[in-house]
Image (tube, rainbow, N blue to C red):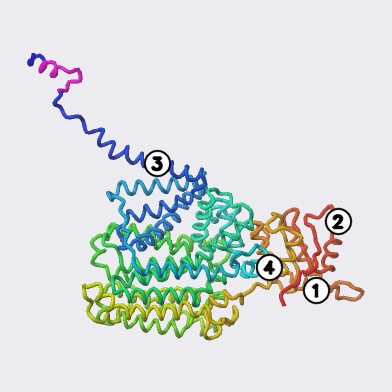
Amino acid sequence: MAGLETAQRAERPDGMSDRTPPPRVASFASRRLIRPAGLVVAAWVIAVGATVVHAALLIPVLLVVGTASLLRTGGGLVDRLVIAAATVAGALIVAGLLFSVWPWGLSPAAVGGFSLSVLAIAGEFSGRRPRLTFRLYGTDAVLVAFAAASYRIMHAPVAGANFIKTLPYTSARADLFNHFSLFDAIHRLGQYGFINENASGKIAADGMNFVYPEGSHYLWALVDIFLRSTTNPGPAVGEYMRYYRYETLDMAILTFALAWAARWVAGPTAGWRRLAVVATVAGLVAYGQLSALFWQGFDGEMMGLAALAVAAAVLARPPKSLREHVFLASILIVLVAWCYTLYVIHVGLIVLAAVVIYRKRLLPHWRALVPIAFVVGVLSVTPYVIASTGSVSVNQLFTAGGLSVKISYDLALAFTGLLFLATWSAPGRRRPITLVVGGGTLAIGAAVSLLAAYRLATIGDVGYYVGKMLDGYWALLLVGFGVCVRLVAVGPKWSPSWRRRTLTSAPYALAVAAIAIAVGAVLPYTKPNGDAVNGPTPGTSWAAIWKAGYILSPYAPPLDVYSRTYKFGDGVPTVLLYSDVGEDNRHMGMFLGALNHDMGELNVDQFWRFPGLGTFRPAGPNGQLSQAQRDEFTNLINYLDMMPDGTRVVVRNQAVYEELVAYTDVAARQWTPVQMDGLVPPS
C-alpha cells in the first residue's frame, strides 16, 4: 500500500510531486503588482468617498500626514509636518501642470485620487514603512501661539462683520483685487491662467495670468476646492471673503514659517535659546514691518517668503539621507520659484553656499545630480519665461516704482552685523549650518545693497522690486538669527537631575519670556497711531495701526451707496465713473470687476484715460463742450463701444449722464447709462 501511494503521488497529472515546492510567481506578483494596485484602489476610494460626503478637506490632511510618515527629516512632530506640508505644496504645484490639461480640472476627487495614489506608490517602492514621531517641544506651543496671534490681529477689524461693514478694510487695496482675480480664474477654469490665455484673461486683471507667479493662488484655489468639496466657488461675495481669510492665513503662515526656520537652523540647543529664537523672530514678524505685507495686499510675496524660509532652513541643515536631501531641496526650490519668482535669486545663492559647504557629500554623485539640477532649473525659471511672453514687460516691472514695505535699515544693519559675527567666529566656521545660512544670506545682502545703491544713485529711489528683494533679505536675516543665538554661552553645566536642571534654566527662560512679552504683547496694546504712508509713531507697531482701524479704504462710502441699488457680484459688467481722478474710477472698477469675474475683460487700466468726469460740465460758450472735454468724452465712448452687451455705466454727474443718453439712439446702444447720487470721491 505504501508503495502504491508513492507511485500515485509520482504520477500526478501536472507532473509535480507533493514534495515539489509551489511556484513563487504568485508571491512575486502579490508583492510587485497586487499590493500597489490595491493601494491605488484604496486611494481613489478614499478620495471619491470623501468628496461625496463633503469631507474632501481630509485629502490634503492625509497627504501631509502620509508624506510626514515617509520622511525621516525632523526629530519632532511639528518639524516633520512643516517639511511635509512644504513638500506637498511644491509637488502639487508641479502636478498642477498635469491637472491643467487633463479633462477633470481641479476636481477634488480626481486631484485627491491621483495625489494619494502617487503617495502610496512612492511609499511602497521606497521601501520605507510609514512612521511618525510624536515628540513635541515646548517652543511648538510658542510657534502656534504667535501664528494665532498674527491671524487674530489681521482679522480683528472684520471679525463678525457683514460684507458691507468689511468694505473699509476689504476694498482698500488694489493688489488684493488683482490677486483675487487670478485666484478666481484658476478656481473657475481648473487650470493655471497661462494655460488658457483667452479665458483667464477675461477674469484676471490685465497681465496677471502671465506676469505674476501663480503658485500661491493655485494652492489656495485647491484648498478652497477641498474645503467645499466642489469646484464651484459659489457666490462672488462669499468667494471673495474666503480668499480674504486665506490672505490672513498667509500672514499667520509667514509668522510660523520664519520662526520655525530660525529654530531649525539653531539646531539642538538649550531650551531657553530656542525660546529666545522663536519669541524674537515671531514677534518681529507678527507685529513688525512684515505685517504690512497683509494690508498692502502682497499675497504672493507672503507665501514666497514663507517658502524661502523653509527652503533655506532645509538646505542649510539637510537630512542625513542624500536622496531625501536632494528630493526636498528640489521640491522646495520649485515651491519658492512658483510662489514668488523674484526670490529664486535668494534661494539660488543659498543653494550655491550649500553646494560649496557640502561639496564632499555631493561630488561623488555628480552624474546623478546634474540632470536633476537641470530639471529643477527649468521648472524654476518657467514662471519667468512665461512672464516674459506676456503683454507686460518684466524688465519694466523691475524698474517700476510703487508702494512697498520700507524695512528699517538700522535694524537690518544690526542683524547683519550679528550674523557676520556668528558666521566668522571660530564656532561658526566649524559649523556647516552657520556657514550656509550666514554665507548665503550675507552674499544676498551684498548683491541687494549694490543694486539698491545703483538705483539710488540713478533715480533716487530703490524701486519697487528692489524693495521686495530687501524684504527677502530681511526674512533671511531673521532665519539667520537662529545661528546667531548660539554665540550666547549656555551658562553653568546642566545637572542630569531634573530639579537642578529646572532651577538652572529657569532664570534664562523667565528672562526670555519677559522679552517676548515686551516685544509681542505690549506693542500691540500701546496706543497706536500712524498711517499707511508714514507708518506707525514711535512706541507702537505696524500691526497695531491696522488692528486699531487707522488704515481705512476711502472707497467704502461710495461702494456702500452703490450696494443700495445693485447687488455686488450680480454678473453685469459695470463701469463706475464718479471722480475727477482716474485712479479713483480705476480702483472702483477693479473691485466691481473682481466680483463680477470680468476685470480683465473690462480692461480697467483704461479708466486712467477718463479724468475730470466727476465734475463734468459744459465749459465752452453757450454751454458747449470744450475741445478737451470733447476728446475725453470721445475716448469714453470708444471704450464703451468695445464693452460687452449690457454693460452698466454708473455715473455721478447728471451732465455726463445726459451726454451719454444723447450720444446715440436707445435701440443702438450696447450699454446702459445710470445716474446715481451720493457717490462722493475721496477728498
Tell me whether the residue at label 4 lies in contact with that at label 3, contact meaning CB atoms closer than 8 angstroms: no
Q: Amino acid at mark 1?
A: Thr
Which label is found at residue 42?
3
- Residue 589: x and y, percent? 69, 64
Mark 2 residue element: loop
Left or right side of 623 for 166: left
- In the orientation shown, which residue stands out farthest toward the front? 499
Query: Which of disc 4 and disc 1 is earlier in sequence?
Result: 4
Which residue is identified by label 1?
Answer: 615
Separation of residues labelled 2 and 1 (CA atoms): 25 Å
**Stretch in magenta:** 5-17
- Reply above or below: 39 against 452: above
The N terminus lies in which quarter of the figure? Answer: top left
Question: Which quadrant of the figure has residue 536?
Answer: bottom right
Separation of residues labelled 4 and 3 (CA atoms): 51 Å
Q: Residues within 10 Å of mark 3 (few under 14, many from 20)?
A: some
Which residue is identified by label 2?
Answer: 665
- In the orientation shown, which residue stands out farthest toward the right? 622
Residue at figure coordinates x 57%, y 51% from the top left: 189
Separation of residues labelled 2 and 3 (CA atoms): 65 Å
Nearer the observer: mark 4 or 2; the answer is 4
Residue at figure coordinates x 34%, y 64% from the top left: 136
Q: Residues within 10 Å of mark 1 (few under 14, many from 20)?
A: some
Which label is found at residue 586?
4
Q: Amino acid at mark 4?
A: Arg
Separation of residues labelled 4 and 2 (CA atoms): 28 Å
Query: Which of disc 1 and disc 3 is earlier in sequence?
Result: 3
